[in-house]
Amino acid sequence: MNDPKFAVWAPDAHDVQLQLGHDRLDLAARDDGWWELPAFGRPGVAREATVDVDYGFIVDGRGPFADPRSRRQPAGVHALSRTFDPSAHVWRDGGFTGRQLAGAVIYELHVGTFTPEGTFEAAAGRLDHLQSIGVDFVELLPVNAFNGTHNWGYDGVLWYAVHEGYGGPAAYQSFVDACHQRGIGVIQDVVYNHLGPSGNYLPQFGPYLSEAAGNTWGSSLNLDGPHSDPVRRYILDNALMWLADYHVDGLRLDAVHALRDASATHLLEQLAAEVAALSAETGRPRTLIAESDLNDPRLVTPREANGYGLDAQWSDDFHHAVHVSLTGETTGYYADFEPLDALAKVLTHGFFHDGTYSSFRERTHGRRIDLERMPTWRLVVSSQNHDQIGNRAVGDRLSAQLDVGQLAIAAALTLLGPYTPMLFMGEEWGATTPWQFFTSHPEPELGTATATGRINEFARMGWDPAQVPDPQDEQTFERSKLNWSEAAEPEHARLLGFYRELAALRRAHPDFTDPRFDQIAVAFDAGAGWLRLHRGRTKILINLGAQSVRIPDSGGEVLLAFTACGDAVQGRLPNALQLSPHSVVVLA
């Protein structure tokens, strides 16, 4: 619940007032830079804080501004905040004991485009579908308050508030509750490395932002400079809010490589320690997953072994290797992944760049994983995700380039491979709707700058500017919504059935959740275009090529097979199998 004292941190202010309804009340300064209502206060203020009250803060005559820790912004990020009492929700998830990440399947979705309605309530209506494909965790793209009606979520400026267009904080609680009642955990994507371009009033209150150079998306947070302790507390309390008040099971930490922190105890390590304490207190596993392009296993090394103690991190190398092997694209950062042995290395060593030269970065990149000690599940992998689709010029999915057999190969490598698989909404039926970059900045100049910047960015990469969608165009957002009717069409339904079979196979055979690197082996023939992945006593045979191929193998019971057309296994020889083009076969 919002503090009934309506306290706010403003260490450099000379005067702070509380705008409470139509009243303005003077706040008193504390020695630590916080301002609050005087002890004598105003009769009834504490009681009123528990109901829907609009309020804001006036700092040295400027404002009123929204509360930096606002829980609700019903009229937008430029308007007053509204109190919200999270304890009012009656939770019905007492029987849910949580989920560990090991052995789990994650499903990434954007609330605004997952359903036509774009709300938490509508998303909850699709949970039976997610159960049918073996989903253990729903990972929500950022839901905190941003300016406008629709956005990816990475332009958030009020990190404690839930976007009203999705249903607000009460609807968020109901969604998490519904997930838990079906045994599905929730991971919330959070952004602590920058703030959006509109509605960020934090500098009006104090030194939240760093004076050092910013990152790609905006100013960096003040994590290690003067007055940085309350800024770090602002982030840590936000993380704990999702896990405690909203019963969320884990956090996906956006672009942690952009967190500038030279403190002796890095913010991530401090976060891991506090989340571990909360997990012990509540008796439920709480998971921290980092998005990082550093390929540094120190992030997921336990704190007692001098690591940061996070649970897992994304591995883009897996995506790149799978993408190149199926599409043949070799531009930009895909160039190093052209040989098929790149995919083989990723499957057996986790990272491709683990101290090797990156032609895209023009330097050595990454660090080797300790294969004897690190479990494979600490790497979260995908063949498609919001970044790798949405940051393409036209937001095209793999379904725009590949046939259904190739899509099945990508699915098998992701779901039956060694790592924690993550699916992107709609991939399970080969959705043809794009997922494009969309914004709704109300400020005309900001909207124009965003659209122009996007077009210029891809023009430099050789794309026809006319093909790059305008992110401010309402249709860019509408095109990105899933078309659920596709899932019933024959070819799409066939692929969806394969995903369900993969989920069942993953549950039935321990080999597919075995976290030991030494239980993985790969054989391949780059010229012939085939690859064989061993997971303990089971094998996954893949024909990446457009021609039938003979794969050396001793054979075994066919547990699952899929091909673009016809039978996946065209024939058996004493020591080989003949596989159809673009096919995958799983053998016991």
Image: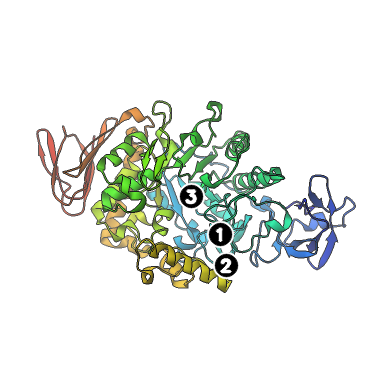
Depth check: give the residue in front, 89 or 230: 230
Disc marking residue 148 = 2
Residue contact between numbered discs 1 and 2, judged by CB atoms under 8 Å? yes
Distance between the Cα atoms at labels 1 and 3? 18 Å
Mark 3 — residue? Answer: 139
Mark 1 — residue? Answer: 155
Q: Residue at x 53, y 43 (%)?
A: 250
Distance between the Cα atoms at labels 1 and 2? 10 Å
* Residue 501 seen in the current view: no
Question: Which of pointers 3 and 2 lies earlier in the amino acid sequence?
Answer: 3
Residue located farthest toward the bottom when viewing the structure as drawn: 444
Q: Amino acid at mark 2?
A: Gly
Looking at the image, residue 392 lies above or below residue 545: below
Looking at the image, residue 551 lies above or below residue 162: above
For mark 2, does the 10 Å Cα neighbourhood hold few (<14), some (14 to 19), or many (20 or more) residues? Answer: some
Q: Nearer the viewer, mark 1 or mark 2?
A: 1
